[in-house]
């Protein structure tokens, strides 16, 4: 809060608490994927869109693109 006050950014504790709750919701997955991990399904869907939109030219293997640093 003190950093925001010093930067003249309007805020209050209730708003900060609300924002933290929203951010924490983003970390909780309903599909069983661990926070910070990329699911194969999400990767395939995204890759398909990128290929259709000509943003990438070839398929990239999931295991080549994503290597988890923590396997817990």
Image (tube, rainbow, N blue to C red):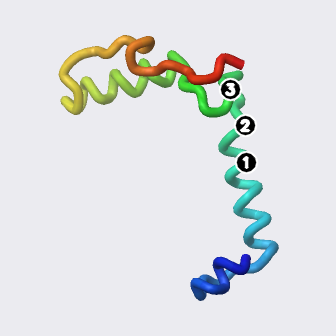
Res. 62 image quadrant: top left
Answer with left or right where residue 28 lies relative to residue 66.
Answer: right
Q: x, y percentage for residue 10?
A: 64, 84
- Mark found first going from the N terminus, 3 or 2: 2
- Of the 4 image quadrants, the one containing the N terminus is bottom right
Query: Which class describes the residues within 10 Å of circle 1: few (<14), some (14-19), or many (20+)?
Result: few
Query: Which of pointers 3 and 2 indicates the residue nearer the eye?
Result: 3
Q: Position of residue 56 (x, y in %)?
A: 23, 27
3D distance between C-alphas at marks 2 and 1: 7 Å
Which residue matches tag 2?
28
x and y percentages locating residue 29 in the rendered image: 69, 32
Q: Residue at x 46, y 21 (%)?
A: 66
Mark 3 touching mark 2, by CB under 8 A? no
Quick check: 44 left or right of 39?
left
The residue at 59%/88% (across/down) is: 8
Q: Secondary structure at mark 2?
A: loop
**Residue highlighted by disc 1:** 24
Q: Secondary structure at mark 1?
A: helix
Tags 2 and 1 touching, CB below 8 Å: yes
- Secondary structure, mark 3, is loop
């Amino acid at each position: 809060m003190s950093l925001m006050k010093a930067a003249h950014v309007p805020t209050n504790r209730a708003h900060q608490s609300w924002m933290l709750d929203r951010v924490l919701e983003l970390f909780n997955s309903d599909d069983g994927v661990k926070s910070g991990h990329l699911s194969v399904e999400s990767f395939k869907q995204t890759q398909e869109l990128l290929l259709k939109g000509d943003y990438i030219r070839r398929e990239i293997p999931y295991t080549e693109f994503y290597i988890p640093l923590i396997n817990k």
